[in-house]
Image: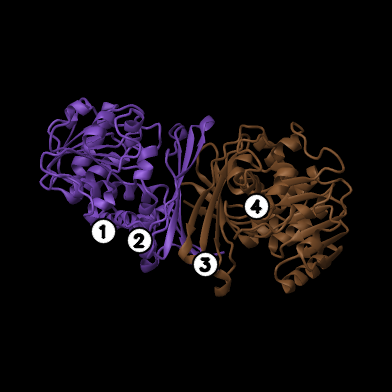
Chain colours: A purple, B brown
Amino acid sequence: MARMLIAAEADLRRVAALDASMVDCVEQAFVALAGGRVVMPPVLRLDIAEHRGEVDVKTAYVPGLDGFALKVSPGFFDNPQRGLPSLNGLMILLSATTGLVQALLLDNGYLTALRTAAAGAVAARHLARPDATSAAILGAGEQARLQLAALTLVRPITRAALWARNPARAAAAAAECAARLAIEVTAAPDPQAACRGADIIVTTTPAERPILSADWIVPGQHITAMGSDAGHKNEIDPLLVARAGYVADSLAQTRRLGELHHAIVAGLVPADADLPELGQVIAGTRPGRIGRDAITLCDLTGTGVQDTAIATLAHARLLAAGIGQTFAT
Amino acid sequence: MARMLIAAEADLRRVAALDASMVDCVEQAFVALAGGRVVMPPVLRLDIAEHRGEVDVKTAYVPGLDGFALKVSPGFFDNPQRGLPSLNGLMILLSATTGLVQALLLDNGYLTALRTAAAGAVAARHLARPDATSAAILGAGEQARLQLAALTLVRPITRAALWARNPARAAAAAAECAARLAIEVTAAPDPQAACRGADIIVTTTPAERPILSADWIVPGQHITAMGSDAGHKNEIDPLLVARAGYVADSLAQTRRLGELHHAIVAGLVPADADLPELGQVIAGTRPGRIGRDAITLCDLTGTGVQDTAIATLAHARLLAAGIGQTFAT
């Protein structure tokens, strides 16, 4: 009889938070991905149009780690009308040597939110100017807040402007971020105003048409686009994708799901363009920012290696802290 | 706070078995698949070559059912050396309207074994001669035994011959099946001998080269091939696939993963051949067996609709019986 550990979201919140160790964990995941020995199949995606639902399943095997995660991410966009969150999900950690389930991490998307925010920190650490002090955040959801918090972990951010379609939500998010991070955060009246003077711009929306125009961008800025994880999503002007120093989390994914996809469709970037991945930039095998005046763009679609990395970290911490419930299988 | 049901393998064995209701359940799944409104993405597959491991993830949304399953099937082929079974896994049942996890069915592959065997019964019910009394089973594993049991549910089987590479395992499996099913079951010295005089032949091996030759097959026989669920697996002589009255469980899958794949690669069947699916035969919209002397072949790769169907059935029975553990998420 085998045993597995089951952890609820509350358990996971006790052992994992957005902090420097989480950023390092996700950074190492990208390095592993760039090393070429990771096995990461294409995302499995199920669409349930009649209920405005979708499910993504991601996984990756990282040599050297004892386990690998299978991450199930449902998004059902009528849920708020039922008083339920749109995003949910869980991670299953399996042994990389036996395939047995080691842990069920019933995180309701919490670990995904952390590893996504941590990827934003990793992107800024390796692509933004070292002395970046100002940020623009487009969007006012959970990731908007987390991405700003993530930037403060890696750059000396002192002020930020936040824009969202709904001005009331933008104002509330700005106030909350200001209080939590102890920096100046203002709500901007439009996205162009938010981006003006920002050293780092992070887009965090589910937009299906660009919300960031190439015309607004000035030398030295870094952009992280983390909203697009499906072919129909598009936050960034394809012209900007073509002009900027482009870096993918996973080129195989961004060609199909990311901002790059739209630049390819528009004929602005060749489909087989050999663009750098974040892990290569971290490892130093490909250039990232090539000067103070460069414009850099990191296209994050979310990768299975991040899930495997954070699930492994969370599992180790649960075991060390004696948190969670064991279940005989 | 939401609640989910967690059921262990022992719980599932109490509520689900290979019986007529299970065959009907899987039959309805194939009918739904043929109806064209099912959403069934391609199988996600992760290979971990250095540990001789693989994981398949299958899913399907079936309109009209409250939930849909995500089925995780690891196969790690060095496990027997560790005293562990090669195959494991679990099913996650999610609400089709909210995406919330309704149940975790920690079946270690038990439900998969049942729904796979039930598909064999469905294939025989709609493709084998009604008066089929004899069977040949190639393979001696769990599915070999279950497939023979499944045939007895739908056809008046009185005798069977079983062949496997390992004669001792074949003899043991034959003896066990004879005792359990109260029919005559003998171990055959070679696959050709096993198939001689059989009305129904079922192949259940992980063979990567054909074990069933087209030359051995005579008019009236029905073949179900259920061993191939990956592109490198191949049990059936491609010539037989081309000649027989061919039926797929899912044509999209058998073109990539099934016996059909090898017949296409060999140039014996056009890649875009419009071949019938089992659900269409059940529904009567495409012909199956066109006469007593026809040779029929059903190519089973295993489909997400079967998983959704059996997970839904098992969940309903667990709830009705008050079996399983609820877990706050």
Q: Are marks 1 and 3 in contact (CB under 8 Å)?
A: no
Q: Secondary structure at mark 3?
A: strand
The residue identified by callout 3 is A3
Q: Are marks 2 and 4 in contact (CB under 8 Å)?
A: no
At label 3, which amino acid type do we have?
Answer: Arg
Does residue B104 appear in the picture of this structure?
A: no
Q: Are marks 4 and 1 in contact (CB under 8 Å)?
A: no
Q: Secondary structure at mark 1?
A: helix
Question: Could you tell me residue B178's position as x and y percent?
Answer: 83, 66
Instruction: Name the mark nearer the viewer: 2 or 4.
Output: 2
> Alpha-carbon neighbours of circle 1 within 10 Å: few (<14), some, or many (≥20)?
few
The answer to whether residue B69 is above or below residue A60 is above
The residue identified by callout 2 is A313
In space, the residues marked 1 and 3 are separated at their CA atoms by 28 Å
At label 2, which amino acid type do we have?
Answer: Leu
Which residue is at 73% across, 48% downward? B240
Q: Which mark is residue A21?
A: 1
Q: Earlier in the sequence, mark 2 or mark 1?
A: 1
| Nearer-the-camera pick, B126 or A69 | B126
